[in-house]
């Protein structure tokens, strides 16, 4: 259920599944070089990824 929440939100923000999947599989400076996909295994990681997607949605990149 939690992964579905992240996926729906990510696809909404990125516009397509393909763009979201590329992003979720790419290393992120905001996550110390980890891929968002790598930290989704726990609730804390899910919250970090949702927060990061929200910052991207609102144009806050730093």
Image: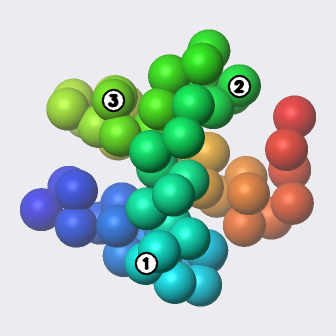
Residue 54 horizontal/vertical position (percent): 64, 58
Task: Name the residue at 57% across, 31% down.
Answer: 27
Q: CA distance from mark 3 to mark 2?
A: 14 Å
Give whichever of discs 3 and 1 has the lower sequence position.
Answer: 1
Check the image and report above or below for 59 versus 50. below
CA–CA distance in space, label 2 to label 1: 22 Å
Q: Name the residue rendered at 63%, 32% in the picture.
A: 28
Image side of residue 48 versus residue 39, left or right: right
Q: Mark 2: few, some, or many residues within 10 Å (few <14, many ≥20)?
A: few
Which quadrant does the N terminus fall into? bottom left
Residue density around tag 1, few if under 14, some if 14–19, many if 20 or more, within 10 Å: some
Q: Is residue 1 left or right of residue 39?
A: left
Question: Picture quarter containing residue 7?
Answer: bottom left
- Residue 29 is tagged as 2
What number is the disc on residue 53?
Answer: none
Is any part of residue 47 visible from this angle?
no
Residue 25 pos. (x, y %): 44, 45
Residue at mark 3: 38
| Residue tagged 1 | 17
Give the percent coordinates (x, y) of residue 15: 59, 84
- Determine the residue positioned at 46% across, 49% down: 24
> Of helix, strand and loop, which one carries label 2?
helix
Location of residue 40 (image quadrant): top left
Query: Dot 3: within a 10 Å radius of its alpha carbon, few (fewer than 14), some, or many (20 or more) residues?
Result: some
Quadrant for the C terminus, please: top right
């Amino acid at each position: 259920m939690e992964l579905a929440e992240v996926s729906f939100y990510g696809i909404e923000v990125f516009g397509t599944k393909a763009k979201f999947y590329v992003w979720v599989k790419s290393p992120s400076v905001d996550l110390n070089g980890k891929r968002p996909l790598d930290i989704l295994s726990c609730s804390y990681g899910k919250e970090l990824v949702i927060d990061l997607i929200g910052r991207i949605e609102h144009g806050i990149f730093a």
